[in-house]
Image: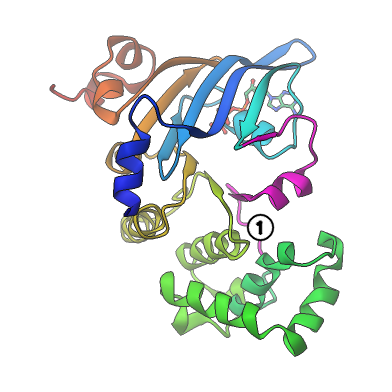
Amino acid sequence: MTATDARQSASTEEATPVLTFEDVVLGFDGVTALNGVSFTVNAGELFAVIGPNGAGKTSIFNVLSGVYRPQQGTVRFGAEDLIGRRPHAIARLGVARTFQNIELFSNLTVLDNLMLGRHLHHPYGVLAAFAWLGKARRNELANRLAVEEIVDFLELAPWRRLPVGLLPYGIQKRVELGRALASEPKLLLLDEPVAGMNLEETEGMARFILDIRDELGLPMVMVEHDMGLVMDLADRIMVIDFGKPIRTGTPREVATDPDVVRAYLGEEHRVTP
Ligand SMILES: Nc1ncnc2c1ncn2[C@@H]1O[C@H](COP(=O)(O)OP(=O)(O)OP(=O)(O)O)[C@@H](O)[C@H]1O
């Protein structure tokens, strides 16, 4: 079965979700960040979360990756309950994340940053990553090969031996995507993958995100403000406002929903059915 077949069959009603986020409530001293958020992500699906500033998008990612512990609700990844697990434990289960602000080692090369992304394959803590890197240099041919595959996949070859800090912003974002892929995740969380990119960089990133879905069949959750990108790429979209989902559906369903148009998109985004 191809990734597209998997996605299509997964979008049918009987599909087993890889991720179930159910009735999650998260508050901070009087501020309710998430107020009963539920959604599922199916195998091979690109699921986007959109909403105005402060709507709760980052909070969803922080719950998913174990940074925040919600007061209520369940979060299930395959057979595993994620609530109460620490971020590194969730990462080890196969949930990888890219960040709004690039989190790479700017003095290290592209290859070394990608190698660090593979530290999850070793019984070392994150803080021991540099020690592991030295070991990896000597011993880990398999890791090198895996990293070179990512370099090819994301077309990073021209920059592979350059320090990341010297690279254009769009390439750095691509390296960050590669670092997340290097851990061989089962679910990828993309936090504003095209934030700050120009049009050309955005189109390049869009192509790689589609390749990840269609060639690797990797399910993804994407938070993104670029409405055009979300409408073009996502299989389904959840719109949230004030910590509550307004509507979840296909891009067309969401874009034509009167509540969504009123609350968030504005008339200029209206799509004719
Ligand atoms: N650690 C925290 N302490 C207190 N309040 C928080 C914390 N994290 C988030 N919030 C609040 O929760 C609400 C949701 O924030 P969140 O960052 O999830 O929104 P967002 O949709 O990601 O916004 P943006 O698009 O601006 O990134 C906001 O009111 C925010 O101020």
Q: Residue at x 60, y 64 (%)?
A: 179
**x and y, in percent, of residue 188 in the image:** 54, 48
Q: Residue at x 63, y 30 (%)?
A: 76
**Which of these two is toward me, 158 or 10?**
10
Taking the magenta stretch, the answer to whether it contains residue 113 is no
Depicted 163 relative to depicted 5: above or below: below
Taking the magenta stretch, the answer to whether it contains residue 92 is yes
Q: Secondary structure at mark 1?
A: loop
**x and y, in percent, of residue 134 in the image:** 80, 82
Q: Residue at x 32, y 43 (%)?
A: 233
Q: Is residue 41 left or right of residue 131?
A: left
Q: Residue at x 49, y 63 (%)?
A: 174
Query: Which residues lie in the magenta part?
Result: 79-104
Give the crowd class for mark 1: few <14, some 14-19, many >=20 residues within 10 Å.
few
Classify the position of the C terminus by image quarter.
top left
Q: Quadrant of ligand 1?
A: top right
**x and y, in percent, of residue 15 in the image:** 41, 31
**x and y, in percent, of residue 199 in the image:** 32, 55
Check disc 1 and report the residue beneath it: 103
